[in-house]
């Protein structure tokens, strides 16, 4: 189905996606790209790692080295990377943008289902405009244990939590995806098997 103007100037939305939304099977999977535009003005993970390195007076990340390992190495040197990440993302001057509002509007039906790897709270702020406080939030390492969850899952934690709970370093990712009693990998496997997932805010491979 086409939305907007026809042809190249419109947007073709697959019928499967429309049906999944109508049936409550659609999960919106939101990445850092959603929070780049003003007035949010937050960095992607690459930019976040570069900011933490700069503020720590350490060399910038080397191409080819995993960013979570870069941040883990800083942590092992004694840098409080979790607090630095929380301070950068929790910038009080950052506000929700139009994309956050559009995502919240799309998700505000009977089954509002969002999974995000973002640390900021802009999606929750916008959901509250539609739903008040009538939605569930899942913080880091508290993944829903059912496929048909509703609410918003902060897969890597959010700035609402203590900084130490953010999933930032290689050790954090190992714990969240491999070691937790109910891991992120187990949760996501269920989501991908039972739902239609729309990725928003994730750049094409190689474009970062």
Image (spheres, rainbow, N blue to C red):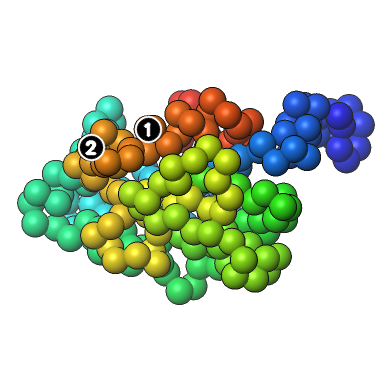
Expressed as whole percent of the image width and height from the top left, the position of residue 173 reads 27, 40
Task: Give the number of callouts.
Answer: 2
Instruction: Give the class, few, some or many, for how many residues have Cα within 10 Å of label 1's Cα (few <14, many ≥20).
Output: some
Expressed as whole percent of the image width and height from the top left, the position of residue 108 reads 70, 55
Q: Is the residue 93 above or below the residue 39 in the image?
A: below
Q: Disc 1 vs disc 2: Cβ atoms closer than 8 Å?
A: no
Q: Which residue is mark 2?
A: 179
Q: Foreground residue, 190 or 163?
A: 190
Expressed as whole percent of the image width and height from the top left, the position of residue 164 reads 24, 60
Q: Which residue is mark 1?
A: 185
Q: Which mark is drawn over residue 173?
A: none
Does residue 68 appear in the picture of this structure?
no
**Side of 197 relative to 92 (left or right):** right
SS of the residue at dot 1? Answer: helix
Instruction: Give the class, few, some or many, for how many residues have Cα within 10 Å of label 2's Cα (few <14, many ≥20).
Output: few
Q: Residue furthest left?
A: 77
Q: Residue at x 8, y 57 (%)?
A: 78
Q: Between disc 1 and disc 2, whose residue precedes?
A: 2
Q: Residue furthest bottom?
A: 92
Image quadrant where one finds the C terminus:
top left
Expressed as whole percent of the image width and height from the top left, the position of residue 145 reads 44, 42
């Amino acid at each position: 189905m086409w939305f907007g103007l026809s042809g190249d100037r419109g947007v073709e939305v697959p019928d499967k996606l429309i049906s999944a939304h109508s049936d409550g099977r659609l999960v919106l999977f939101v990445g850092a790209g959603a929070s780049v535009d003003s007035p949010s003005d937050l960095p992607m993970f690459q930019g976040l790692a570069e900011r933490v390195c700069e503020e720590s007076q350490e060399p910038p990340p080397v191409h080819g080295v995993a960013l979570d390992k870069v941040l883990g190495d800083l942590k092992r040197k004694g840098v409080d990377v979790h607090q630095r990440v929380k301070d950068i993302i929790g910038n009080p001057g950052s506000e929700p943008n139009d994309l956050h509002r559009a995502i919240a509007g799309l998700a505000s039906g009977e089954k509002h289902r969002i999974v995000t790897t973002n640390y900021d709270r802009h999606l929750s702020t916008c959901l509250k405009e539609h739903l008040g406080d009538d939605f569930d939030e899942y913080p880091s390492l508290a993944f829903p244990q059912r496929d048909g969850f509703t609410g918003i899952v902060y897969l890597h934690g959010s700035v609402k939590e203590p900084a130490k709970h953010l999933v930032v370093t290689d050790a954090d990712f190992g714990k969240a995806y491999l070691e937790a009693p109910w891991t992120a990998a187990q949760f996501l496997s269920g989501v991908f098997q039972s739902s239609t997932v729309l990725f928003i805010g994730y750049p094409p491979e190689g474009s970062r």
